[in-house]
Image (cartoon, coloured by chain):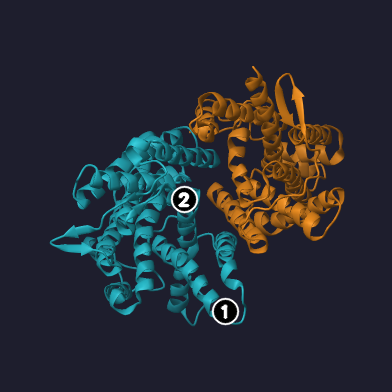
Chain colours: A orange, B cyan
Amino acid sequence: MSDFLQMTLFGLSNGAILALAALGFVLIYKATRVINFAQGHFLLVGAYAFYAAIVILGLHWTLAILVAIAFAAVIGLIVERFVLRPMIGEEAISVIMVTIGLSSILAGGVQVFFGTSPRETPQFLPTGALSIADATIPWSRVTAIVVAAVVLIAFSIFFTRTRHGIAMRAVADDQQAALTMGISVRKVFAMAWALAAVTAVIGGILLADLSGVSAGLAGFGLIVFPVVILGGLDSVPGTIVGGVIIGLLVQYTAGYIGGGLEQIIPFIVLILILMVRPYGLFGQTRIERV
Amino acid sequence: MAATSTGIFHRSYASELALRHTTAEKVRLILVALALLSVPFVVSPYWLTIANQIGIAVIGAIGLNILVGFTGQISLGQGGFLAVGAYSSAILHIRGDLPVPLSVLLATLTTAVIGAFFGIPALRLKGLYLAIATLASQEIILFVVRNWEAVTGGREAIVVPNMEYFGFAFRQDFHWYWVILPLAVLAVLAARNLFRTGLGRSFMAVRDQDIAASAMGVDVTRTKVLAFAVSSGFVGLAGALTAHYTGIVAWERFTLEESILYLAIIIVGGLGSISGTVYGAIFMITLPALITRVGQDLQGTLPGIAEKLPAVQVVVFGLVIVLFLIFEPRGLARIWQRIKDYVRFWPFRY
């Protein structure tokens, strides 16, 4: 029983971070219909920006988070303006490849500055472990769940209550109608990329605290696909449900079946979902029949 | 016959059916053939290795271009299919004791069948959904390779012995060049001719408008599965050749990065262009080697650049993809076309 609880808690915390990474992905897809294969690399850049701010610039961790967020937002804006805007209206393969090229640039750029050896982030989240009925869970994982929950709730409020959030939803729904209402689609696109980069920073910092800063963080970007496909490519609540389901599934598979199956179980789920219900659990039913 | 500004005019069916129409094209073909034949005698062993890698990449990239460029089905799973080709050929040769040509042939067929199987999601999905599904197939194939220890040897690499025929061991790049070159030429010719047949035309019809294609009597389901099979066959051949050429088969060689490299080759070369695929392969395989060379030359002026080189290669790789997509989405094939037009119409602009 304690094993089960342990796995559930670890699965939940992984799922929380997955949901954060998936949120950035969904933000971009919802507003601009671009599949961002570089989302994992945004996590990577965010984690390294935080590391650089705290270790190299010697800032306090609160300040370092702000610096990393600002840096990521700028990167997101630059990427949108110079890479994605020329690609508007191009075929799916071109848009996919441009984000793949982008991920290569980001990965290489990080490697030029920081090399390939993993770095240890200074501990700033509370250490120690929390015991709940025989199961122990490190405080850093509890923090990850809490932070992810706060960010996701904040985004839900942003989308339903603020001017910019509503403008983003309008653009996602119908670009032309949004334009006639005086919404600047360009600004919304730019904002989507900046916000996606910011959520990736938060995810990256949390992930770096759990597993250290290394190029391997980008691999996390691949497991985002099963999450967003399961939850629905354009659904914000879907990321939470998808993230938690995939996070738990990976933990249970690792615990009860093992043998490395946990590495590909998300992808098996992905193919099954694509074959049966391609728009996911909460996505808008807009897929074309072939 | 020459290409005039008003077009190429044929006087017989035979001339229209020819692969090369104009005198300029024929002269260029002879020049290219001479260059290809003289390469192994001129270049250093280092560049000969690169030439062999290009040859293999041409075969694999043509396979991918048949699928992505000509049939419009995006695939991120080429690394997986290369792995299938490499592993099945190596295993058939070592465990099954088959001669290399037979094992390579069987590996090609095996990969075609497995490719058709993994093409099944394409019957329901297209565009980015298909891309994500093929990404998943890649991960699943590599997982099977890593974990099916009884057959693939698991995470351990398989060592493939040198090919030996007529008391002659294919050990050097020089020997392999004469194996890879004819196969690459054959692959180019096969693909070029494929798109003159009904099957090839139906591939393109599905790419351009699948509903219209089906209204014209093209069986879309059959066409898509066949496209995956034909494409994977080429990729399997490339994989099998890699196995015997490098003498080692390890799963790390067939990760997502390999799939991306092949996609980059066809994007840079030109989607839906056979000659473009060849240019793309030459460009993308030579590029890292050139960067290394430049880095070594700069060693004196910029100390410490050597350790940055792998990272610089990754950045340049990404930059090339992004810049081509933004400025010339139709790739090197289109650039070459524009240069030819410029010369032909000179001194006029068009």
From the top left corner, tell me how far across and down residue B168 is, in percent. 17, 64
Mark toward the viewer: 1 or 2: 1
- Which quadrant would residue A182 be assigned to in this image? top right
Disc 1: host chain: B
| Residue B195 vs residue A114, the one in the foreground | A114
Lateral position of residue A249 relative to residue B120, left or right: right
Q: Is residue A239 above or below residue B194?
A: above
Write the residue at 37% across / 62% down.
B53
Lateral position of residue B283 relative to residue A252, left or right: left
Residue highlighted by disc 2: B259
Q: Is residue A94 visible?
A: yes
Residue highlighted by disc 1: B298
- Distance (Cα) linking label 1 and label 2: 31 Å
Disc 2: host chain: B
Q: Secondary structure at mark 1?
A: helix
Write the residue at 75% across / 53% down.
A51
Lateral position of residue A52 relative to residue B178, left or right: right
| Residue A92 vs residue B100, the one in the foreground | B100
Q: Is residue A284 visible?
A: no
Q: Residues within 10 Å of mark 2 (few under 14, many from 20)?
A: many
Write the residue at 54% across / 59% down.
B329
From the top left corner, tell me how far across and down residue B49 is, in percent. 36, 67
- Which quadrant would residue B313 be assigned to in this image? bottom right
Q: Is residue A62 above or below residue A52?
A: above
From the top left corner, tell me how far across and down residue A158 is, in percent. 83, 36
Looking at marks 1 and 2 on the same chain, the residue that comes earlier in the sequence is marked by 2
Q: Amino acid at mark 1?
A: Leu
| Residue A209 vs residue B333, the one in the foreground | A209
Q: Amino acid at mark 2?
A: Ser
